[in-house]
Image: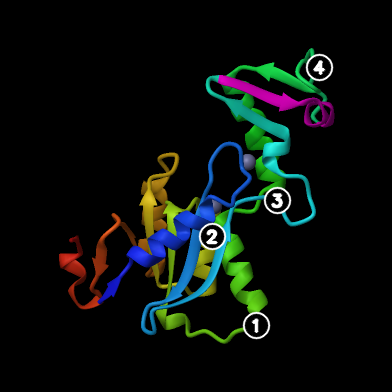
Amino acid sequence: MIKLKPFINTARVWAENSSCARLKVGACIINMETRRLLSIGYNGTISGMYNCNNIFVKNGEDYYVSKDILKYMEVDLPFERDGFAHIDRDNWLRHHHLFSDKLEVHAEQNAIYNLIKTGASYDTDNLAIVCTHAPCRQCAKAIAALGIKYVFYINEYDNNEEIVMKYFNSVGVICRQVQDDCVYNEDEEEDFEEE
Ligand SMILES: [Zn+2]
Ligand SMILES: [Zn+2]
């Protein structure tokens, strides 16, 4: 049995470090048997590169994007506010998606890379990843490829759960949505519940 609350808190705290203007995501990899924290990750560009929130700004219902990225994407818009253009939400999301797809690394993948970079040996039979959001399809593949056996997430993400859950099922990864006080008991997989 493992209490996931400390690791849920850890994933949340690291999500706050994210400089993504759209969504802050955090993840941590743990050993289910020793209950040790092995690595953490949050979404963002690689170190040394400009951050998402240097380019995309959201202020209440107002959405801005820097002229540099628009130039790069060959979009022609008038600029106000120190080199930022005021754009509508849909366009902001669209540009962010293009930017993110090219340059941002997801929290789950950063947690995996951080684990590998530590050079620590790890027992894949007992690896779990705790995430603030359900993994996307790309991260699901990376999680399965590393040999992580359990995935716990807090929030749904962009309605991709069904396809991701099917994938995890097909490769033998147990994936569960959890609440703060969730206790996971491997021996009673059927009775998985929140306390
Ligand atoms: Zn972003
Ligand atoms: Zn992802």
In the picture of the structure, the residue carrying the numbered disc 1 is: 119
Q: Is mark 2 within 8 Å of ligand 2?
A: yes
- Proximity of marks 4 and 2: CB atoms separated by less than 8 Å: no
Residue extent of the magenta highlight: 62-72
Q: Position of residue 131 (x, y in %)?
A: 44, 58
Q: Earlier in the sequence, mark 3 or mark 4?
A: 3
**Looking at the image, residue 21 lies above or below residue 66:** below
| Residue type pointed to by label 1 | Gly
Q: Residue furthest left?
A: 191
Left or right of 23? Residue 67 is: right
Give the numbered dot on residue 45: 3
Q: Earlier in the sequence, mark 3 or mark 1?
A: 3
Q: CA distance from mark 4 to mark 1?
A: 47 Å
Q: Which residue is mark 2?
A: 108
* C-alpha distance separating marks 2 and 1: 18 Å
Identify the secondary structure beneath mark 2: helix
Q: Is residue 69 magenta?
A: yes
Q: In the rendered view of the protein, which quadrant contains the C terminus? A: bottom left
Question: Which colour assignment does the render follow?
Answer: rainbow
Q: Point out the frontmost of discs 3 and 4.
A: 3
Residue type highlighted by circle 3: Thr
- In this rendering, position of residue 54 left or right of residue 134: right
Q: Is residue 76 magenta?
A: no
**Residue 83 location, x and y as percent?**
81, 23
Q: Residues within 10 Å of mark 1 (few under 14, many from 20)?
A: few
